[in-house]
Amino acid sequence: MALAVLSVLLSQTQQLHSSVDIGSISELRGNAQVLRDKPYGAELDFGILSYDKVETANGRMGITFIDDTQIRLTENSQVLIDEFIFDPDPDKSKMALTFAKGTARFVTGKLNRVSKKNIKIRTNSAVVGIRGTDFTITVDELGRSLVILLPNPDGTSSGEITVETGMGMVILNQPYESTVASAFEQAPTSPVILDITLDLIDNMLIVNPPEQTQESLEQSQTQASADYLDFNDLDIDFLAEDFLDAEAELEFTELDINYLDVNFLEDLLNVLDALAISKEEDALKQGGVGIRIVGTEIGQDKDTQITTIVSGQNISLTRKVSQSAKLTLDGSNSYTVILIQDGVSNTVKINGGSSTTITIKQGTG
């Protein structure tokens, strides 16, 4: 009986939480909807509830939560509000979102109504922990996630976020620092700092273009009327016009780029993921599966005069000049090897090196 009563109370509590507005649609352009008990067409000031699924089609949407956190979604994006619990005590408040696809910018509330340690954003390939205030997430059709930490308006770091998978975690704490998580079973890529600007991100994620004032509209109409009245087709020398001058017509400059016509961040995700794969392949070329060797080359290195042979997970280092030395190691471990022969010293680090150092010294000295 007690269990049945507890179950009913929990159900009622969940319904109470799910029926209370936790935010509203604050910006809207184009087609979008909120999926609840049924699909609801998105409109400004439409209330958002816990467990809502919000998605855009050929449109963009901005949501402002009651803690002042903002989310801006580009076209073909989808986010599920897993949990939002608001309590007067920020440490008891929680927010959990699942971002399924598309591109979104997250600006966490500055009112500290929800402790940042209690905010989690999940994708298919990573979990983002919030210690900062401003960042973007792009999730492509393969489930890969690109996360970029954005700066404050003055250019300083907006804080710190973590990107974690089942195989590791990276910390982003520099402006425009980014990482890619390709799958939850893989570690995120090493952070890189992108050469982009906040204006570019703002243009990419703009929801509502600035409205023209009545004055500017009147000026535009007056200018259009004046231009039309001033036009006289008798003044045109059609023989002097080169309508086949394709070079001038097709000239393309940076000013012609419309970042809203492309998903720049998805393209960037592809570039960074390819870069990470290239680095991984370079490491594999150096040695066996996952073996990294720094300080000498695989095979016969004419500079160090060390011959390195990798067979499976076994590594053999041989140096034979006036003295002869050979060392066989297990490539699944990390080593720092210092080989000194007749006063000539070579240091080889395997898998990043370690605090355990193997020193072989031969000859005089």
Image: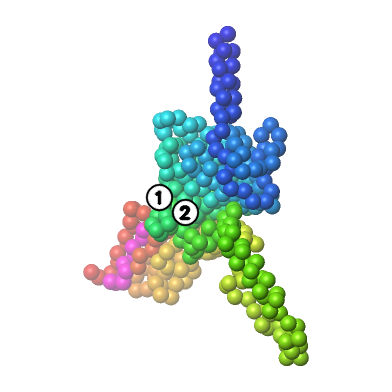
Residue 87 figure quarter: top left
Q: Dot 1: within a 10 Å radius of its alpha carbon, few (fewer than 14), some, or many (20 or more) residues?
A: some
Q: Which of the numbered marks, if any, corresponds to residue 149?
A: 2
Secondary structure under tag 2 reads strand
Instruction: Tell me how far mark 1 sits from mark 2, CA to CA.
Output: 8 Å
Which is nearer the eye, 315 or 147? 147
Q: Is residue 245 shown to the viewer in this render?
A: yes
Which is nearer the eye, 124 or 17? 17
Q: Position of residue 341 (x, y in %)?
A: 31, 69
Q: Amino acid at mark 1?
A: Gly
Earlier along the polypeptide chain: callout 1 or callout 2?
Answer: 2
Q: Residue at x 47, y 45 (%)?
A: 108
Q: Amino acid at mark 2?
A: Leu
Q: Position of residue 60 (x, y in %)?
A: 63, 51
Could you tell me what secondary structure mostly forms the magenta stretch?
strand
Q: Residue furthest left?
A: 365
